[in-house]
Each structure stands twice: as structure tokens, then as C-alpha cells.
Amino acid sequence: MNKLIAALLVTAVVSGTAAASEGPSEAQFHAYKAYHHGQYLVVTAESAGGTNKLVHTTSLPTEGTDPVVSPALDHLYSKAVVDLTKGPVVLTLPKVEDRYFSLHITDQEHYTIYDEIRPRGTYVFVRYDYKGEVPAGTVIKSRGDYPHVFVRTQAFNSSELENVKKIQDKITLKGVVGSISVKNDDYLQFTINSHDVYDENSGLLESLSQTYTQADHAKIREYLYAWYAKSGLFSNEGAFGPIDSKENHSDNTTLRAAGIIGHLGLPVHHAYYAPMFINCDKKRLNGSKDYSITVPYKNPGVGEFWSVTRYSQLTGNTIPGKNDLFNAYNTKPDANGNVTITFSATEPNDGTYWMPVNKDEPYYYVERYYAPDADTLVTSADACPQG
């Protein structure tokens, strides 16, 4: 991990911990995660036509209307709410070797319980306390009835999306189709009823069930957005891994809750995310001033691929009608083996790659590095003064 992001992450976590004592409680932060994820499960199951049914995205979210905050433009998604109330559920994945392809499973408390790059074959979901016969395959045990399946299939560019769709068509999910019912929008009680809460979090959701409201949820979201923007630069280290993750800061409740801003994000060993809201002078990025970054075309710390995607700070989404993405598939290295990207309202015409931004509007960008090696990874922040 580069020193600047590491230092700012520590600052953000420490300040976030201190602020948490004056703001939301540990129970409220955990409730925020469970409430948001519960809402998401209901919406996703409805959009798929039920639980145990896959829903595929078939186009890249370039027009600023995607429901996901900071949507990636590197791949198409295949998602499903697994329903274990009627027994095991079987997921079958094709062999994919020509591109990044991954499986990511999240439980109802928003912890990663399984992730794999280029999975293939049969995966069997069961409740961790299930006593019946288990079909053959890689077994994934869940503490709850409704683990979430997230399959990412890399898209090199918009012209070859049909190749991705052919892969998606080979993904199957077999289980009894059902639905999710949540009374009075009490997503905390829904989680308590359908998921065995970890011992480490015992009593947190129970203390707020029946009293936690959408208004409470909105206030905590505002608090976390302010915390996130104030911290400026930090990675996803500690935000998305399993409850017993060995990642630094993974026991920080503020950071875990802030991770909902990147809901369903991958653990840092799988993908390193570096969201940049400020420049090297720690000033908020804004379209009123041109800004350039340089990244290596062949990054020594990247096992899969890298990308840089830009978003509006006003919407948390892509900017309609403008290019939003650069990666190794739509750029070429300069004489020094680097790629330089200029964020500006007008085209720079200086040989750098132009990432358009709206004049006088704040924006941010996210560097994504898949299969990273923290010891050798190079990010644009490495060029900033240290200290």
C-alpha cells in the first residue's frame, strides 16, 4: 500500500473512532449496515422475480442513473439472493480463462464469507447448521437464510458485451424460488429472524429493532458521507472482509459502516480500491481546476487489471454523455511506460488522456487494482509529497 493512502487511512480511522463516540453508536453503525443490506435484498429479489433467481446487468452504467454508488465500469454483474429456507441451493459457473471472472458472497451483516477469482464448477450453499444431505460441490456455509451471490464478468469495452452475455447465460442457480417479506420496513428484525447474528455483535441489532427508522438511517448516512469526504483519501482495507479478517482496521465500526457507500465491495486482497476526493494538496477535486494523475501501464502490483473511473461528487454516479473510464484496454503507455490522465472541463490537447469533468462541480475518481500485491502496488498518490 502506498504511504500517503496508508497514512490518511490511519488518520481517517482514528478520527472516525473518536467522532463515533460523539455521533452514532456502535449499535447504530451496525444497524445501518443490516438495514441497508436488508433493503437491498428485498429490491434485488423483486427485480429478479424471486429469490434463487439470477439477475444480470447487460450494459455498462455510463449514464449516471445506476442505483449503485460509484458503479464499476470494468465488468457486468450477475446477482442473486440465495434462499436457504427450503434447503441447499446450487450455483454452477462456467470455466472462464480469457478475462477476470469472480465470485463474491456476502452475508446479512455485510461480511464477506467467500470470494474467488476465476471460480468454476459447482458451489453449494447451506445453512451452517444444516443437518441434511448436501449435494456435491464446493460448500459455502451461511449463518443466514439469505446470502447474496455477486458474480463479476470483465468487459474489456462496450463493443464486446455480447461475449460477456454468453458467459452470463452459462451461469445457473438451482433452488426453490421464493420471496422476501419484511413487515413495517423493520429490516433489523428481519435480519434477526433470518440470520444468526455473530456473537461479537450480539444485542446490537436487538437494541434498535422496532425503533430504528428510515429517518435514523438517513441521518447516519449523512454522517458517514461527511466522515468519508473529510478523510479524503483511503482504501477499502478493513471495510469488506469477513468478520475475522486479518486486514488492518477491520474491527473499526465506523469504517465498516462507511463501506456501505461502496456496498458489496470486495476485500482488499481481492481488489484494492483507492477513492480520491482530494488532490495532493488535500484540496477537494473540482472541475474549476485541471488536475492530472500518472499511473504505470504495467503495474508491478497488479495480478489482473487496473482501471480509473471518475464520478460526480454531487450524485455519486457517472457523468452522462462523457467518458468515465480508462484502463489498459483503451490506453497505450508513453515512452516511460506510464499513462497520464487529465481531469478537466475542456480537452487539454497535450497528449494526455482526457477525462471530462463538469466545470465548477466537485468530482472524485476511483483507482481499482484487481489481485493486488500491497508491497509492489503503485498508485497515483505515490507521486504526492509524503508526510
Image (cartoon, helix red, strand yellow):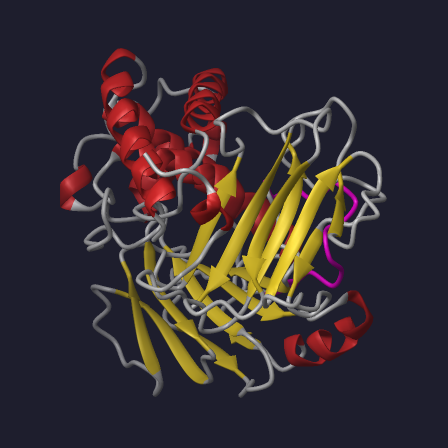
Nearest to the observer: residue 146 or residue 348: 348
Number of labels in the image equals 0
Name the residue rendered at 70%, 44% in the picture.
342
Residue 326's image quarter?
A: bottom right
Q: Residue at x 23, y 19 (%)?
A: 18
The residue positioned 16% from the left and 37% from the top of the image is 202
Q: Is residue 126 left or right of residue 271?
A: left
Relative to 274, is 137 above or below? below
Q: Is residue 58 magenta?
A: yes
Name the image quarter holding residue 105.
Answer: bottom left
Q: Residue furthest left?
A: 199
- Judge by depth and name the residue closer to the eye, 203 or 336: 336
Q: Indicate left or right for 135 with 96 as reference.
A: left
Q: Residue at x 23, y 64 (%)?
A: 128
Q: Is residue 53 visible?
A: yes
Residue 167 spot, x, y in % from top left:
65, 80
- x, y percent for residue 271: 43, 60
21 on left or right of 361: left
Residue 172 belongs to magenta span = no
- The image quadrant where one finds the C terminus is top left
**Pick the front one: 194 or 288:** 288
**What's the magenta region?**
54-69
Q: Position of residue 15 (x, y in %)?
A: 28, 23
**Above or below, 329 relative to 366:** below
- Which residue is at the far top? 22
Front-lying residue, 232 or 280 = 280
Which quadrant of the view contains residue 60? bottom right
Q: Main secondary structure of the magenta part?
A: loop
Residue 175 visible in rendering = no
